[in-house]
Image: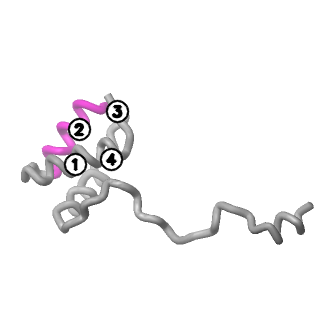
Amino acid sequence: MDSSKQAQRAVIQFLSAEGVSGTDIYSRMKNVYGTECMSRTAVFRWCSDFRHGRVSTADMPRPGQAHVVPHATQDFLR
């Protein structure tokens, strides 16, 4: 069973579209995924997002420090 975040979000998206409540979705996911299940809060947040029109199960990009060191900085560090 694929317990990745993406797979769990797809389950939430599908069940939300069918009108299943967040409480029932979490309960069903907890039975299937066990300790790998996302938190109740996360399930409810994703349910809300999907019910308000979100279509993607992917993470949104977040602002913050770049993960790449610019070449000028690399030269400086040598």
Above or below, 16 against 31 in this view is below
For disc 4, the marked residue is 39
Sort mark 4 into few (<14), some (14-19) or many (20+) by Cα contacts within 10 Å.
Answer: few
Image location of residue 42, percent across then percent down: 31, 53
Magenta residues, as a range? 22-34
**Identity of the residue drawn at 20% across and 67% down:** 53
Residues at marks 2 and 1 touching, judged by CB atoms closer than 8 Å: yes
Of tags 2 and 3, the one toward the viewer is 3
Residue kind at label 3, given as amino acid type: Asp
Residue kind at label 1, given as amino acid type: Ile
Sequence-earlier tag: 3 or 1: 3
Q: Nearer the viewer, residue 22 or 16?
A: 16
Kindly report the secondary structure that dominates the magenta region of the rendered protein.
helix
Sort mark 3 into few (<14), some (14-19) or many (20+) by Cα contacts within 10 Å.
Answer: few
Mark 4–mark 2 Cα distance, whole angstroms, equals: 10 Å
Image location of residue 77, percent across then percent down: 88, 63
Sequence-earlier tag: 4 or 1: 1
Residue kind at label 2, given as amino acid type: Met
For disc 3, the marked residue is 2
Sequence-earlier tag: 2 or 1: 1
Mark 4–mark 1 Cα distance, whole angstroms, equals: 12 Å
Mark 3–mark 1 Cα distance, whole angstroms, equals: 14 Å
For disc 2, the marked residue is 29
Sort mark 2 into few (<14), some (14-19) or many (20+) by Cα contacts within 10 Å.
Answer: many
For disc 1, the marked residue is 12
Above or below, 68 against 35 in this view is below
Mark 2–mark 3 Cα distance, whole angstroms, equals: 12 Å
Coloring applied to the structure:
one colour
Sequence-earlier tag: 3 or 4: 3
| Direction from residue 52 to residue 5 in the image, left or right | right
Residue kind at label 4, given as amino acid type: Ser
